[in-house]
Image (cartoon, rainbow, N blue to C red):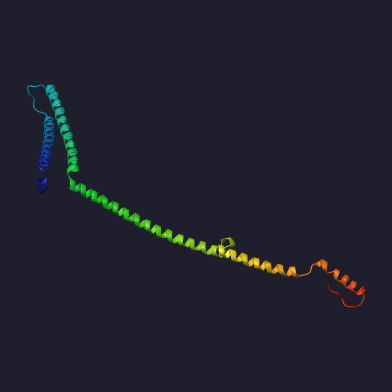
């Protein structure tokens, strides 16, 4: 009753009309069904013939059956109106349903965040291991073109100095063609006779 008193006057009147309609429809169905049962009873002979009485009872049953169907349709419409009334005016239930859905979505979001965080950590660990393995293998198999530029120039300078050290002794050694001429010069000096050799 407290909830009804808290409702506005228009809503209170609407609920009262729904309640009255519900009672009227149920009473109509009960009364018509009772009259159909009474009509089915066989009565004693009257001034009306049995054929005429049968036709009248048949017509009355059809009318009362139609009244029952109409009352049932009215009840179905009343149920639809009550659903619409609850959807449009029952704000606490609507808010509760919205809160429940929000809680479900928040729980789903937190679960997705936990899974994404775990996946990120696993990917980070795997990536770190792959990078460590790659850099360890590349450092052991590093070639000259992978060296820094200053290291390349330093090695080139060392190679150039080593090559110059090998070429200098070769330049200082006599040529092969000068070897046979020395005996001829000695023979010429002996042919000219004894004496000191003049140097030019």
Q: Residue at point 16% right, 27% down? A: 62
> How many dots with numbers?
0
Q: Is residue 147 visible?
A: no
Image quadrant in which you'd find residue 139 = bottom right
Residue closer to the observer: 25 or 189: 189
Q: Along the line of sight, which residue is nearer the eye, 9 or 20? A: 9
Q: Is residue 160 left or right of residue 59?
A: right
Q: Position of residue 25 (x, y in %)?
A: 13, 35
Q: Reply above or below: 143 against 64.
A: below
* Residue at the extreme left: 47
Q: Nearer the viewer, residue 32 or 156?
A: 156
Residue 104 seen by the camera: yes
The residue lying toward the viewer, choosing from 29 and 195, is 195
* Drawn side of residue 130 relative to residue 178, left or right: left
Residue at 19%, 40% (x, y): give it: 84
Quadrant including the C terminus: bottom right
Q: Say above or below: 103 vs 87.
A: below
Q: Give the vertical position of 97 relative to 163 (above or below).
A: above
Q: Could you tell me residue 184's position as x and y percent?
A: 88, 70
In x, y percent, where is residue 2?
10, 48
Quadrant assignment, res 70: top left
Q: Residue furthest bottom?
A: 195
């Amino acid at each position: 009753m407290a909830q009804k008193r808290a409702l506005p006057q228009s809503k209170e009147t609407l609920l009262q009309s729904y309640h009255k309609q519900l009672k009227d429809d149920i009473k109509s169905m009960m009364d018509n069904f009772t009259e159909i049962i009474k009509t089915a009873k066989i009565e004693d002979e009257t001034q009306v013939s049995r054929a005429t009485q049968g036709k009248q009872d048949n017509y009355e049953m059809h009318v009362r059956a139609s009244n029952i169907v109409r009352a049932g349709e009215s009840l179905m419409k009343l149920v639809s109106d009550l659903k619409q009334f609850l959807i449009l005016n029952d704000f606490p239930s609507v808010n509760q349903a919205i809160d429940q859905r929000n809680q479900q979505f928040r729980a789903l979001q937190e679960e997705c965040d936990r899974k994404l965080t775990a996946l990120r950590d696993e990917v980070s660990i795997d990536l770190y291991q792959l990078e460590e393995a790659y850099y360890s293998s590349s450092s052991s198999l590093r070639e000259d073109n992978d060296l820094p530029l200053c290291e390349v120039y330093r090695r080139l300078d060392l190679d150039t100095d080593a090559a110059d050290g090998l070429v200098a002794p070769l330049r200082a050694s006599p040529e092969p063609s000068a070897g046979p001429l020395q005996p001829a010069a000695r023979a010429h000096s002996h042919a000219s006779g004894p004496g000191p050799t003049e140097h030019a």
